[in-house]
Amino acid sequence: MPEFSAIENTLFIPMLGRIYASEHFPNILHDETALSLKGALPEGLADKGSQSQYTLLASASRSANMDRCIRHFLRRKPGGVIAELGCGLETTYCRNDDGHTRWYAVDLPEVMAYRRALLPKPERQTYLAGDAFSGDWIGRIRVDAPDAPVLVTAGGLFHYFEEEKVVALLRTLHGFGNVEVAFDGVSGIGMGMMQKKYMKQMGHADARMFFCVGSAAELARRIGGDTCAVAEEPYYRHVDKAGLKLSTKLSMGVSDRLRMVKMVYVREGEGQPR
């Protein structure tokens, strides 16, 4: 396995969460591809840190939330294109392939090389090795699909980067036209909690966080133009909590009540947050 930076090493967190959910709570997320890769992951990875049911299912919930965003987008825009930023070892394509949609997966070269070794490129997904914040990848997509609606997903990515860098990327994307962006955002309180407690539990206390979202509408104003916040949903709103430990249910409930973590959806044009 290659040597990754502190941020790159977090790519294993969602994989472990998807495996855990698939084995114990398939009502939240079932991922056959993640299960098939369990034996190929670095030895002892599951024992790294001291993850709780809550932290494992937080990762799985993000994947389930992104699945909902993608399916909703493709129902509205059946000719749309999906672009996953910071794809890591995410297996979204395998869970949502409809047989005709074009997908793009973007991550740093060393991460993409490792991804290729574990997840050979599917027929309709293009692997792009590069910096998600460079914007080169959206130019490539526009060459391939000049007029197609594009949904950009950024799961577990933006909060590791400075606000100016995130806002600059979102401005660039909306400059290409007909682009929608879905990502998980954390509030200031949520970021403090994740940094001080949950990242330490997961064995990644050295991965610092910078970008928080207090209000999706305010973020849309910062992006400028006619960008609007279409959705700002509590992170665990759609999670089936049957069978979960009481401590996990309480943690999810507190997170949602305080809007510590949320799903944010921005695009061009008119719309109201919900």
Image (cartoon, rainbow, N blue to C red):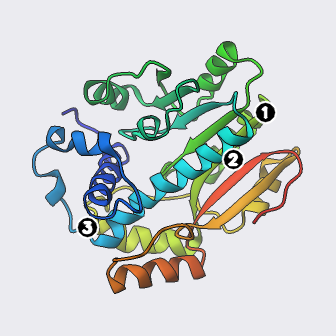
**Residue 140 x, y percent position in the rendering:** 62, 17
Q: Is residue 263 above or below residue 42?
A: below
The residue tagged 1 is: 178
C-alpha distance separating marks 1 and 2: 17 Å
Q: Secondary structure at mark 1?
A: loop
The residue tagged 3 is: 51
**Residue 72 x, y percent position in the rendering:** 66, 47
Residue 42, numbered circle: none
Labels 1 and 3 touching (C-beta < 8 A): no
Q: Residue flagged by tag 3: what amino acid is it?
A: Gln
C-alpha distance separating marks 1 and 3: 39 Å
Q: In the displayed structure, does residue 230 sit left or right of residue 8?
A: right
Q: Secondary structure at mark 3?
A: loop
**Residue 270 x, y percent position in the rendering:** 89, 51
The residue tagged 2 is: 167
C-alpha distance separating marks 3 and 2: 32 Å
- Residue 59 lies in quadrant: bottom left
**Earlier residue among tags 1 and 3:** 3
Q: Residue at x 61, y 22 (%)?
A: 136
- Residue 189 lies in quadrant: bottom right
Q: Could you tell me which quadrant the N terminus lies in?
A: top left
Q: Residue furthest top?
A: 143
* Number of the front mark, 1 or 2: 1
Q: Residue at x 59, y 43 (%)?
A: 70
* Structural crowding at the residue carrying mark 2, measured as other residues with C-alpha within 10 Å and reported as few (<14), some (14–19) or many (≥20): some
